[in-house]
Every structure is written in structure tokens, then in C-alpha cells.
Amino acid sequence: MFTKISAEEFYNNHAAKYDYIVKTPNAQVQYLNEAVKIFQQRNYHQGSVLDIGCGTGLLSELLQGDFEYTGIDISVNMLGYATQRGYKTIHKPIEKALVEIDSHSYDFVFCLGSLYFVEDAQTAIEHIYRIARKTILISLTEATDEYIKNHVIPVYDHSKMVIKNAMEDYFILGWTPPNTGIPIRTRMIYIEQKN
Ligand SMILES: C[S@@+](CC[C@H](N)C(=O)[O-])C[C@H]1O[C@@H](n2cnc3c(N)ncnc32)[C@H](O)[C@@H]1O
């Protein structure tokens, strides 16, 4: 057995290497590009983006267009890089931050690679529906029992949860942790809000 550490401590320690790790070919990080592909097929080019669990703000490097980014993250060191990319930042856990955000206050809400750190993903998703004006893009990491046991941060598997009225909902090979070499599946979900 080993002692798990919090997501905050882990990402504070790894912030300086995060982008490098995501971009190394053997990590095979696909979920970010897949999210960008789904979004850009809809021809959105401007508006406000809420990036939940934004990390270093890599999303803003990938999306083409004139977007204003606000990022929520628990790690101050990850947010430091997001700030350098032009993000406004909210340094709070997702669970606390979402409750405080007004309804219909962002055009586009993204939540990529971060909900598996949140125990109550259902409540978080209900807030995401409340906050988004136009579209929602969520990726849900499939955390197998083996992965949950061995990962250094506590994680939860939400990949089977019921999500209604999604326009896109499918699994891809999302990424491969370099330490195990075992690909992790990611469920990609795209929702358009009804006005
Ligand atoms: C795997 S990274 C994903 C970052 C970014 N979305 C991306 O795809 O590159 C997960 C991020 O979620 C953040 N995080 C983890 N648990 C969190 C929580 N409970 N509240 C807010 N942020 C959290 C971490 O600090 C980290 O920056």
C-alpha cells in the first residue's frame, strides 16, 4: 500500500512538466484534440468559455477563434500557466466554484479530464447544465478498479453515468499513462442547450 495525495498537491508538484507530458507521443493524449474536433465542427468562433479543471489552459492553444477564457482549478501552480495564456482564474475546488457561478453565464462550458477527481459528478454536471448558454463538452475518464487502486490521487469512475440528450456520446482511447503503458478510455460528450 502507498499513501495517496490530494489532486492539489499532485498538480502543484507537476505543473511545470504538465504540458510537456501531455505533448509527449507515448502519452497519446487524444481527448483534448477530440473535444476540439467536436466543437469546431459546429463553427463556433467567439464567445465566453468556462474551462472546468482547466489546468495550464492548454485548451486555449487548441481552439481557433476569439474566445474569453475563465478557468477553475484547485492547483495554484497550474493556474499560473493558465494566467500566462490569458485566462481569468477561479482558484477553488470544482465542487465549491460551480455553486457560486450564475446561471446562463458562459456560452461554452468545457470540463475535460477533471471530473474523475470529483466524487459527486452528478451535481457538478447539473451545475454545468445550469451555467452553459450554448454548448457543453465533457470528457469522462474510465477509471477501472485497477486504475483507482494504483493511481496516486483518489479518483472515481463516472464513465457509465446516464447523460440524456447528448448530441455526441462515445468512447475513444483518451490517453496512456506513461508509467503503465495501459491505454485509458475516455467518454466524449457533447450537448447543445435548448433556448
Ligand atoms: C488531468 S488535468 C486536466 C487539465 C486540462 N483540463 C487538460 O485537459 O489539459 C486535471 C486538472 O484538474 C484539476 N483538479 C483536480 N481536482 C480538482 C477539483 N476538485 N477542483 C478543481 N480542480 C481540480 C487539477 O489540478 C488539474 O489541473
Image (cartoon, rainbow, N blue to C red):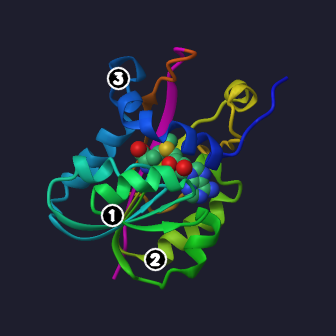
Task: Tell which of 151 and 140 is nearer to you.
Answer: 151
Q: Is residue 118 left or right of residue 176?
A: right
Task: Tell which of 135 and 12 is nearer to you.
Answer: 12
User: Which secondary structure lies at badge 1?
Assistant: loop
Q: Amino acid at mark 2?
A: Ile
Q: Are marks 1 and 3 in contact (CB under 8 Å)?
A: no
Residue 193 belongs to magenta span: yes
Magenta span: 181-195
User: Which secondary structure lies at badge 2?
Assistant: helix
Mark 2, other Cα within 10 Å: few <14 / some 14–19 / many ≥20:
many
- Residue 140 image offset from top left, x and y in percent: 52, 45
> Residue drawn 85% across and 23% down?
1
Q: Confirm whether residue 5 shows in the render.
A: yes
Separation of marks 2 and 3 at Cα, in angstroms: 34 Å
Image quarter of residue 30: top left
Q: Which residue is mark 3?
A: 24
* Quadrant of the image containing the C terminus: bottom left
Mark 3, other Cα within 10 Å: few <14 / some 14–19 / many ≥20:
few
> Residue drawn 66% across and 42% down?
157
Disc 2 or 3, which lies upstream in sequence? 3
Q: Which residue is mark 2?
A: 131
Q: Amino acid at mark 1?
A: Tyr
- Residue 34 image offset from top left, x and y in percent: 31, 40
Q: Which residue is mark 1?
A: 87
Disc 1 or 3, which lies upstream in sequence? 3
**Number of the front mark, 2 or 3:** 3
Q: Within 8 Å of ligand 1, the CB of disc 2? A: no
Q: Amino acid at mark 3?
A: Thr
Mark 1, other Cα within 10 Å: few <14 / some 14–19 / many ≥20:
many
Separation of marks 1 and 3 at Cα, in angstroms: 24 Å
